[in-house]
Amino acid sequence: MVRDMATAREYGRAGALAGLCLLTLFAACTTAPPPPVPPPTTASLPPPPQPELPSPQPPLRPARKPAAPAAAPATTGAADGFEQLTGLDQAATVAIFGEPQERTEAPPAQLWRYVSLDCRLDVYFYLDLQTSQMRVLHYDLTNGNNGNDQSRQKCYGELAGRSDAAGSAARSR
């Protein structure tokens, strides 16, 4: 019986070992790999909420463009000078200097020339697109003196005085 027990022990160990191997084999065969992790999809996520902004308002503009300020006829005082010419229309220029001695076309401008004893004034009128009137944009003063402020004032007095003389002669008729 000792022999049978030794054999049984050997068979028992061998059987236990064989059973353990079989169990390991079966466990390895039955274990499935974990399912693959799907990549994250951004399409399935709702977009983040956008803060509501007020609709942009267009800048306020006047209903129509303001008319260009009417050029008031200037006084003929020598203190005013030639600087007042820029922006005047033809009627206001005639009110100051009278009719020009010469009118010429210098496209796109009209040139009016006034001449006195020592001075020559060239006045250039250009079309104002907003008002459709010809207005002074540039003038050129040439005098026989040195061109200082005093001689400019003398020229202004001569040229503007010429229109006063013509105006008073016309009124006396």
Image (cartoon, rainbow, N blue to C red):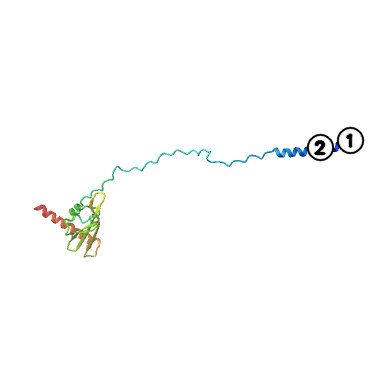
Q: Residue at x 86, y 37 (%)?
A: 9
Q: Residue at x 75, y 37 (%)?
A: 23
Q: Position of residue 83 (x, y in %)?
A: 25, 56
Label 1 to label 2: alpha-carbon separation: 15 Å
Residue 154 in sight here: no
Q: Mark 1 touching mark 2, by CB under 8 A?
A: no
Q: Residue at x 71, y 39 (%)?
A: 29
The N terminus lies in which quarter of the figure? top right
- Identify which amino acid the numbered label 2 is placed on: Gly
Circle on res. 15: 2
Q: Position of residue 125 (x, y in %)?
A: 23, 55
* Location of residue 159 (image quadrant): bottom left
Circle on res. 138: none
Residue 142 in sight here: yes
Sort mark 2 into few (<14), some (14-19) or many (20+) by Cα contacts within 10 Å.
few
- Identify which amino acid the numbered label 1 is placed on: Asp
Looking at the image, residue 133 sits to the left or right of residue 60; the answer is left
Sort mark 1 into few (<14), some (14-19) or many (20+) by Cα contacts within 10 Å.
few
Tally of marks = 2
Looking at the rendered structure, the secondary structure element under dot 2 is: helix
Looking at the rendered structure, the secondary structure element under dot 1 is: helix
Q: Position of residue 74 (x, y in %)?
A: 21, 52
Q: Position of residue 64 (x, y in %)?
A: 28, 44
Residue nearest the observer in this picture, 96 or 28: 28
Looking at the image, residue 11 sits to the left or right of residue 156; the answer is right
User: N-terminal of the two: label 1 or label 2?
Assistant: 1
Residue nearest the observer in this picture, 123 or 97: 123
Circle on res. 4: 1
* Location of residue 19 (image quadrant): top right
47 over 82 or under it: above or below: above
Looking at the image, residue 27 sits to the left or right of residue 57; the answer is right
